[in-house]
Image (cartoon, grey):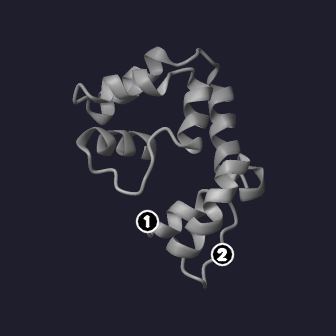
Amino acid sequence: MRTLDKCRASIAGTLGEYHFNCPVDKMFFDFTGITAKKFQAKVATGATDEEMAEFVKKNAKARPAGKIIKWNNVQRDRRLSEMPLGLQEYMETYIPKFVPKNRVVHVFFDVYDIEEQRI
């Protein structure tokens, strides 16, 4: 989870140009009802990925599995134009800097998948 990686880097002082609790992180926090502060406090304990997954399950708003799956799929399918305005503005400079000119961004998460060479 990118939010978890950024939180760990923030705590370690190695975050660089990334931002923990950015608009994308906030979408996750809003959906789960977990605050960034509470999430970061748990991460600061040195919790493993598995322990963080349990933490989220235990502390997130209770929702039927179908609603969680639907939310996840909606996020994965979001186009840049459907993202919060601040994030759209940020991406106007981010994409030209990190996405090769010959690569097409179809949905928001393509940006990171291309950058991190998953697609």
Mark nearer the N terminus (1 vs 2): 2
Q: Secondary structure at mark 2?
A: loop
Q: Residue at x 52, y 19 (%)?
A: 60
Q: Position of residue 115 (x, y in %)?
A: 48, 68
- Quadrant into which the N terminus falls: top left
Distance in Å between CA atoms under marks 1 and 2: 14 Å
Q: Which residue is found at the position 56% from the left and 24% from the top?
A: 32
Q: Which residue is mark 2?
A: 104
In this picture, residue 66 sits left or right of residue 50: right
Q: Residue at x 49, y 38 (%)?
A: 21
- Percent from the top left, x then y, of residue 66? 67, 28
- Within-10-Å neighbours for mark 1: few <14, some 14–19, many 20+: few
In the image, 46 versus 85, the foreground residue is: 85
Q: Nearer the viewer, residue 41 or 57?
A: 41
The x, y position of residue 69, in whole percent, is 63, 35
Q: Which mark is residue 116?
A: 1
The disc placed on residue 59 is none
* Element on which disc 1 rests: loop
Q: Is residue 68 above or below residue 106?
A: above
